[in-house]
Image: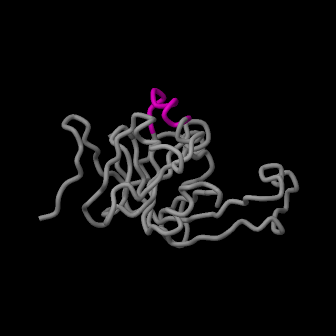
């Protein structure tokens, strides 16, 4: 018998169709922010990391509901997302703004960001979500199975103002994930 996620009573998530995601995805990602979390919890529950992000989108591609998210190679989360098959995008209420700030400003190389931010990791154990990591404080969790990755190539920027985001280095990698789960409360 497969174990259920460890979620305190009264805080259960419900599984919904991603097409019921509330609010403007642009506002939820850009203004409200999200945490991108990835890792391999099969062998070691500390072998994962999270980071705050404000770039991404939700949509449809290749007849699949997908999320696009972007991570710079210099971020500690990059290696985890690059190697994991599942990545979560977690959205929080405004009262967690300081936690999201900390997860964007500090590196998991230096501190346990979840502990410092007061966030409690949840390790999903049921298929098809087994191995995904999120947080019990999250209001909405999108679980993505990576289906495509590509380095952004500055030679292909058609708008020269894009380069202002990079100063000539540390270009993001684009990840496209098929949305295989959406949990909300």
| Relative vertical location of residue 45 with respect to residue 151 in this rendering, above or below | above
Q: What range is drawn magenta here?
A: 92-101
- Horizontal arrangement in the rendering, residue 11 relative to residue 167 (left or right): left
21 or 123, nearer to the observer = 123
Residue 83 spot, x, y in % from top left = 49, 69
- Horizontal arrangement in the rendering, residue 96 relative to residue 182 (left or right): right
174 or 99, nearer to the observer = 99
Looking at this rendering, what residue extends furthest in the left direction? 1
Indicate yes or no whether the magenta region holds residue 100.
yes
Image quadrant occupied by the C terminus: top left
Residue depicted at 50% across the width and 46% down the height? 35
Residue depicted at 55% across the width and 40% down the height? 33
Residue depicted at 32% across the width and 66% down the height? 43
Image quadrant occupied by the N terminus: bottom left
| Relative vertical location of residue 157 with respect to residue 54 in this rendering, above or below | below
Residue depicted at 65% across the width and 57% down the height? 74
Q: Main secondary structure of the magenta part?
A: helix
92 or 84, nearer to the observer = 84
- Horizontal arrangement in the rendering, residue 129 relative to residue 148 (left or right): left
Residue 126 spot, x, y in % from top left = 25, 62
Indicate yes or no whether the magenta region holds residue 160.
no
Residue 169 spot, x, y in % from top left = 78, 59
| Relative vertical location of residue 4 with respect to residue 30 in this rendering, above or below | below
Residue 12 spot, x, y in % from top left = 25, 41
């Amino acid at each position: 018998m497969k174990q259920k996620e460890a979620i305190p009573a009264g805080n259960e998530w419900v599984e919904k169709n991603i097409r019921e995601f509330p609010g403007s995805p642009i506002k939820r990602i850009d203004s409200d922010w999200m945490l991108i979390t990835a890792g391999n919890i099969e062998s070691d529950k500390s072998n994962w990391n999270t980071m705050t992000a404000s770039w991404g989108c939700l949509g449809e591609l290749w007849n699949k509901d997908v999320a696009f998210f972007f991570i710079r190679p210099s971020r500690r989360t990059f290696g985890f997302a690059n190697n994991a098959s599942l990545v979560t995008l977690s959205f929080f209420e405004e009262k967690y703004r300081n936690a999201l700030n900390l997860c964007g400003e500090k590196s998991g190389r230096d501190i346990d960001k979840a502990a410092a931010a007061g966030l409690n990791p949840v390790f999903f154990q049921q298929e098809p979500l087994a191995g995904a990591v999120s947080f019990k404080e999250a209001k909405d969790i999108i679980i993505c199975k990576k289906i495509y990755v590509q380095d952004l190539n500055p030679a292909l920027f058609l708008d020269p103002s894009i380069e202002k985001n990079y100063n000539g280095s540390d270009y993001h990698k684009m990840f496209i994930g098929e949305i295989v789960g959406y949990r909300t409360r």
